[in-house]
Amino acid sequence: MTFIKDLQKVLQQNIREYGMYIALFVIMAIFTVTTNGIFISSRNIVNLLNQTGYIAVLAVGMTLVIVIRHIDLSVGFLAGFLGAVAAIAMAFWKWPVYVVMPVVLGLGVVAGLATASLIAQLGIPSFVASLAGWLIYRGAILLVTMGTGTIIIPDPVFNAIGNGFIPDIPEIGILPGVHKLTLIIGFLAIILFIAGAFNDRKKKKVYKFEVLPLNIFILKLVTISGVIGYITWVLSGYRGISWTLVVVLVVVAIYDFITSKTVLGRHIYAVGGNPEAAELSGISVKKMVYVVFGSMGMLSALSGILFASRLQSATTTAGTLFELDAIAAAYVGGVSAAGGVGKVVGSLIGALVMMSLTSGMNLMSIDISLQYIVRGAVLAAAVIFDVATRNRAK
Amino acid sequence: MNTPILEMKTITKVFPGVKALDNVSFRVNQGEIHCLVGENGAGKSTLMKVLSGVYSHGEYTGEILFNEKLQKFGNTSDSEKAGIAVIYQELALVPEMTVYENIFLGNEITNGFVINWNETIRRSEEMLLKVGLKVNPTIKVKDLSVGKQQLVEIAKALSRDVKLLILDEPTSALNEVDSENLLNLLRDLKKQGVTCILISHKLKEVIKVADSVTVLRDGKTICTLDALNGDVTENVLIKHMVGREIDNIYPPRKHKPHEDVILEVKGWRAYDTTLGRNILKDINFNIKKGEIVGFAGLMGSGRTELALSIFGNPARYRLSGEMHLKGKRVHFRHTSNAIAAGIAYVTEDRKGDGLILIQDVKQNITLANLREISRRSVVDNNAEIRVANEYTTALNIKTPSVEQKVGNLSGGNQQKVSLAKCLFVKPSILILDEPTRGIDVGAKFEIYTIMTKLVEQGMSIIMISSELPEILGMSDRVYIVSSGRIAGELPVEAATQENIMQLATD
């Protein structure tokens, strides 16, 4: 009986953290039932993850922007514009892809720093500064595509980012039609995860710090391993892990590490929690604004690359409303507008929740009008849940 | 004279896990100034929240009789209608609005639909006259000093025909002159038939102004004393408040400060570009190793600005003058340079700009010196917990664990966390700005003991304080700051409350 009690206690204490995962699970389960399993099919899940990619990287950057109590509205059209720049460089100037990508990412950083300088140096509210960027980049994308309209991207390497999959090991006769390298990677991920968890627990015990009760700890390991295993199994049933997924996972892993483990991350959250206190603790608030907006600009460029690569072309409307999808994903993922609270993994889950809704409702052929209403309701529900659990906490 | 205006009987209020009020009885007579004293957490504020309807009827047990009628306030507007007004430490004025708009906010003078601004201004002038505030009611509240804002708030209460005025720590943010004015105002209001409840940590002013005093301790009424016959002394009150006698709350010092000067500031001047004038001019002072130097002065005299201008100038004044640290000339471009050079600053406003309330104890303690517990910019979580545990033990910070959010701690413990953060940067000079504001006697004594220990280890302390007894009790030397300059320097042996006040006000 203590097991149930322990479980209840752990769930209650961490309801804010686990809430999103449970919500994502429930939404996926519902769509699986209503679409007779099409939703959870390998092909659909792979597509879903690829569609989430360009919003997810924006949501990761937006998380930090909102954490330091700012907002960046310019990211959508900046992504679209930089995608067009990449397309022009490859299609017309014949630049090699390995030059184009770092240059475009660098341009993103420059654009982010420009916004940051308005905010940090002149004290202009980020809403206004980035709204100006929104207009400017919207104009810029129209300007560069004016003569040509849609620009077809000829580079196969570039296009693989949004459409390709990691290669498989050669057929060895077992499990035909299954992407075996994906399975191997999934298996390694589970092993690494379990080993890491045990290692961490051992260290904590040496210091006599509080750890989860053993049975809950095992339940957590089994659940997460199960989820990783199931996802890799589903993915391996189609074409395996896509390059987009690799990009997203690498971005999330780097940002999660920076925010939770490094001095820089702690300084960002301190600035969000109380800028005056941070300043008096020797942290430069201005510098953090530059860092966060610079990173946001770089991720906008990455989002533009993912989107252009997925369409294999740059269009005049690329990036429209990306910024609002990213902001919604961040809020669904538990970021607080009051500043100082929010995790990048949460925003990834938030992006998945929003994209699952779109994908599932598309499969059910629900009209677009209703889709917007449902997504709006889910966003509202997520924020209400956040406020309710925050007031109850402790 | 002895008819009660307010009787609270057997009030019990329970929070999850804590009995904040335990069978409290509280009786206030018509037309008196009744002081309510007790340590932080004794239940004073909770009792006043019960009275004013912040906790509605049903959330507590017991009876409230006001004007001989049983009252069941559902919210604060019910108690306001009955004639009870509370003035909190944190003022509830809208800074961007004018004085007259604030006075009649929520109680507008209308002809049913449209506000009559002329009448509003005329009535505001009447109210300002009553509280003795000579300002034009058309100026914005943000342009007034804190002391004057408080008077505006009292004027607001009077405009609503208040019968019982409750003031929660009204003088904690005021200088001696403004405090004195406020106490005089309370006496005037008494003559006009307004009953006052005054909550205060400053026992001297309690003794000066009270007709009766009620002492709370641990959620219980300890006693109600009649102050008119002169039995109430500071020692009696402290004894009742803490349940023991504290002979001398300033711990004795064994060591004398060294003779070598560690910090010297010469010809220091600061120009505030937004105000368009010099806020500091011709400042010269020095700090010796192992010395506590008190900076006395009135609120707004420039003490905090001086501290901030030395501490990397986060407020961005235009500075000129020289600063020598350990014999070397220094210039700090940012607070991080000052911290690296060994200066730490504990702010006067721990909630506003000292702590990150939504983060936990360990994150706050390590914030200013994360490098110390990280390797290649990666924070070592275990080292962090170890450091936090060390400091919570050393400073006796009462918290269930170092993972508790700082916002959930009491004022005294928050102050200690704020202090721990600054000590973790291992400074050689510690600037304490109002180190004991709004914390109770017990926590004060602990802070003083810590300060004594630190200077014995060779640290130098700059202590900015508006409490003269604290300046006299703790300092080795006193500088008096007045209107942005050093008005005088006194060795503590020669300093008295009188000569400090004289220098501070000239």
Image (spheres, coloured by chain):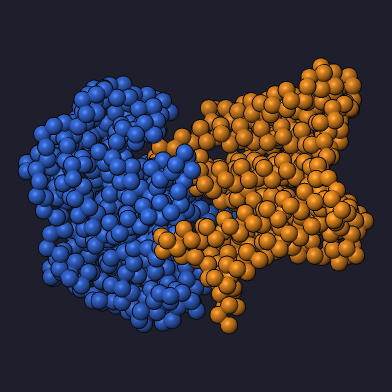
Considering every residue shown, the one lying at the far top of the view is A93
Q: Quick one: which chain is blue? A: B
Report whether A373 appears left or right of A125: right
Report whether A258 appears left or right of B195: right
* Residue at horizontal 32 percent and vertical 69 percent from the top: B42
Report whether B444 appears left or right of B44: left
Q: Is residue B226 visible?
A: yes
In the rendered view, tell whether residue B8 sits above or below residue A273: below
Viewer-closest of B212 and B193: B212
* Residue at horizontal 64 percent and vertical 51 percent from the top: A345
Q: Position of residue B326 (x, y in %)?
A: 22, 29
Q: Position of residue B354 (x, y in %)?
A: 39, 47
Considering every residue shown, the one lying at the far front of the view is A172
Q: Is residue B4 visible?
A: no
Q: Position of residue A326 (x, y in %)?
A: 71, 44
Viewer-closest of B174 and A23: A23
In the rendered view, tell whether residue A371 sits above or below residue A91: below
In the rendered view, tell whether residue B116 sits above or below residue A91: below
Report whether A379 appears left or right of B134: right
* Residue at horizontal 39 percent and vertical 65 percent from the top: B400
Viewer-closest of A136 and A233: A233
Q: Quick one: which chain is orange? A: A
* Residue at horizontal 57 percent and vertical 67 percent from the top: A217
Looking at the rendering, which quadrant does residue A224 occupy?
A: bottom right
Viewer-closest of B497 and A25: A25
